[in-house]
Structure formats: C-alpha cells, structure tokens
Image: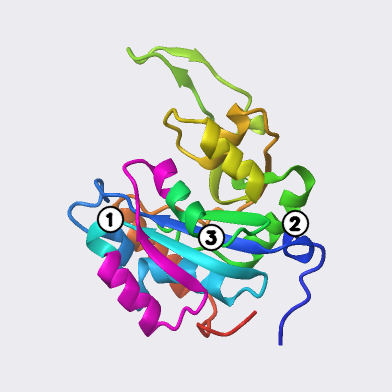
Amino acid sequence: MARNHGPIAGSHGTVGAIVVAAGASRRMGGIDKIFAPLDGLPLIAHSLHVLNSLDCVKQIVLVLSEGNLDRGGELIASESMTKVTHVCEGGSRRQDSVLIGLNRLDGFDWVAVHDGARPLLTDDIVLRGLKSVVETGATTAAVRVKDTIKIVEEDGTVTSTPARDRLWAVQTPQIFAHDLLRNAHDRVKTGVTDDASMVEMIGGKVKVFEGSYENIKVTTPEDLILAESLLKQRPARTHGASS
C-alpha cells in the first residue's frame, strides 16, 4: 500500500528523475565504480531501486558512459525497473549529461537530479527534498560541515577561516522546477560542478535540506568498502516494491 507522504512537490505536479553516471571513475584504480558489486547488486542499482519504488516519481532517465550502455539496459531489464524509460549516453561534462537526461523526460513539473555514484540514497532523503523544493523551486541535499575549513592560496598559505556554522557540504539529489532547470541549462554555458550552481548563476534562490552523512559519493576504492559496510547495517529491502 502506498504511504501518505504529505505535502510534497509530487502532490502539486509530476516528478521525473535523472540519474547521472557517465563519469570515467578516474580515481578508482581501474574499477568501474558504477557497476562495482555492492551488497549483492551493481552500485548504480541501489539509487535506481529507491527512485523506482517511490510512487511520486513517475519516470527515470539513466545517463551512462558509452561503454556502459549495454550493461545499463541489461540491468534495468533484469531488475524490473519499470520507470526507467531511457538509458542514454552522457556528454563530456556533467551538465551536458544532465541536459541529455532532461531532454528525455516527458515534461514533468519537477525534476530530481541524482549522482549515480551515491548509492546510499533513501526514500526519506528524496521526500524531504520534494517537500523543500516547493518553497523556492530549487533545493539540494546537504549536510553541515563538521571540520574547520580553511581558504588556502596555491602556495599553501591560509588566507581565511570561514565560520563553520554556515558551511554545508552539498550532495544529491538536487530537485528543481522543470522550467527553472531548463532555463539554467539554456543560459549557463561555463563549466559547473552541480545544477544548483547554474540556478544560482541566473539569480535563482536555492535552499538546502538535510541529506545524510551516509549519502556518500563513491570516488575511491576505500569509499566502496565504507558503502558496503553502511548498506549491510540497513534493514533488508525488497526491491521493486512500491512505497
């Protein structure tokens, strides 16, 4: 039975998702992190299963590197991820890959963009984001920074220490009103590291919502070990069931 998620973006329009996983895994020591085994499934399958199980998410586009397209299609079929309608090749930059995915979505009111290298996504993170986005039309998962941060010159000299209580480490998913995200991609052509930055650059207001310290991005072999450990501590999940 579907849960009542309360007032979320999905209650006021349709939601599509783009999962971006077209990177080169350069820091993985030869391991293709996207299809690395993680608690019995390829890494990319974990976040896809979460999105596929949420009733409020109606369509998913998976963006992969050229070499992973066949494996991606086989995974979607074998895991019965019925909401994944397209498995497509990404571009040279992350924002190019997001735009490719955006062009495949069926005109949804809201768009969630998630990094496929973050396998520890949960229903609750997505639902918090869908509640947050209705306020400004743009929101990103984030966690408060625990460490003291230094601004450092190229020669290693510290120039300043920003107040830690105002620093957040940004994660995904990032969720946007479709038209706002489209406008940002149409107008911003310089390289950026995330879609929230693009919205900021065109004058949009971006909010943060609480992500999770477990929602790590796998970038090194050590991250795979940590992700495996964190997943094994979670209750067993029945994939493919609707939330």
Q: Nearer the viewer, mark 1 or mark 3?
A: 3
- The residue that disc 2 covers is 131
User: Farthest bottom residue?
Assistant: 1
Which residue is painted at 58% across and 39% down in the image? 196
* The residue stretch that appears in magenta: 69-97
Secondary element at image label 3: loop
203 left or right, relative to 80: right
Q: Nearer the viewer, mark 2 or mark 3?
A: 3
- Give x and y (percent) for residue 113: 53, 53
User: Farthest right residue?
Assistant: 7
Which residue is painted at 40% across and 43% down in the image? 96
* Res 38 seen here: no
Work out how far the residue at label 2 is from the one at label 3, CA to CA, in angstroms.
Answer: 21 Å
Image quarter of residue 55: bottom right
In the rendered view, tell whether residue 110 sits above or below residue 35. above
Question: Which of 3 and 106 lies nearest the eye of the viewer?
Answer: 106
Q: Which amino acid is tagged 1?
A: Pro
**Mark sitting earlier along the chain (2/3):** 3
26 left or right, relative to 192: left
Numbered circle sitting on residue 105: 3
Q: Residues within 10 Å of mark 2 (few under 14, many from 20)?
A: some
Q: Is residue 219 magenta?
A: no
Work out how far the residue at label 1 is from the one at label 2, CA to CA, in angstroms.
Answer: 34 Å
